[in-house]
Amino acid sequence: MKAVFFDLFETLITEKTRTDFQATAPIHERLGTTKDRSSFWWKENEDAAMRGKFPDCLARFTHLCVAVGSPLTENEIVVAAQEHEVWKSKVLSCVEPQIFEMLRKVRARGLKVGIISNALPEEVLAWRFCPLQDHVDPVVFSCSVGVMKPDREIFELACSRMCVQPSEAYFVGDGSYNELRGAASVGMKAIQAAWYQDRDLEWSGTPPLARVDSIKDLPDLLC
């Protein structure tokens, strides 16, 4: 094995389990709509958004507000988008120390490290504030390349950029977007990262899905 690719959110960075990231009002409230309307819009537009349909946060918020009949003015939508971008910068700037220690040990085993993430433009923009950028090699964001997990193309692209074969690489992720099955479908060895999100996943593949419940245990599993 020559490389390890990580999912980003809820694998290397956690947003959902940190109480200090849950203090602001939900997006639907800030955009003057209801949770149901916002959720319906997201269900209809999520894949396109993750593949880069909207060039930035403002474009996505504007599309949503028009679709749901939000009372916000154009200037208020601009402010909401700017605040959300600042928020994402805060999220990506907060990486727990044990993540860095884990990555150091992984690299010490001679493995290259990359990231494959379903991401929105404001998250790509916020990546410049993320201290992880000095600890990984290729970073493949879905909205930048036009494909998203679990499509096999995004895994193949990441491996190509790392100059490794899929069979020579691990993929470690919490399991959202059916990413582990997608990685396994191209020949990568999939490992569930359960240290932030304890997801129950159905798995009928061969070999059985490996699962790691503690960040500190991952490097030893890769041996």
Image (spheres, rainbow, N blue to C red):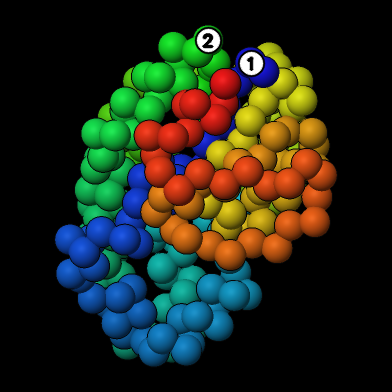
Q: Are marks 1 and 2 in contact (CB under 8 Å)?
A: yes
| Front-lying residue, 212 or 15 | 212
Three-letter residue code for mark 2: Gly
Q: Eyeballing the image, is 84 above or below 139?
A: below
The percent position of residue 66, horizontal first and vertical second, equals 46, 80
Is residue 183 shown left or right of residue 126? right
* Residue pointed to by mark 1: 2
| 137, 1: nearer the viewer | 1
First along the sequence among labels 1 and 2: 1
- Residue occupying the point 18% across, 69% down: 23
Q: Is residue 177 above or below residue 156?
A: below
Q: Dot 2 surroundings within 10 Å: few (below 14), some, or many (20 or more)?
A: few
**Residue at coordinates 53% horizontally, 62% vertically from top-left?**
199
User: Is 66 on the left-hand or right-hand side of 104?
Assistant: right
Q: Secondary structure at mark 2?
A: loop
Please report the residue visible at 24 percent of the width from the left and 67 percent of the height from the top. Answer: 22
Q: Amino acid at mark 1?
A: Lys
The x, y position of residue 151, in whole percent, is 74, 48
Answer yes or no: is residue 158 visible: yes
Residue at (46% x, 21% y) in the render: 106
- Does residue 145 appear to the left or right of 91 in the view shown? right
Q: Where residue 90 sits: x, y (%)? A: 22, 48
Q: Secondary structure at mark 1?
A: loop
The quarter holding residue 135 reads: top left
For the N terminus, the quadrant is top right
Q: How many other residues sit within 10 Å of disc 1, few (<14), some (14-19) or many (≥20)?
A: some
Identify residue for label 2: 110
Q: Which mark is residue 13?
A: none
**Residue 163 point in image, percent of width and height:** 68, 14
Instruction: Indicate whether 1 appears above or below 199.
Output: above
* Quarter of the picture holding the C terminus: top right
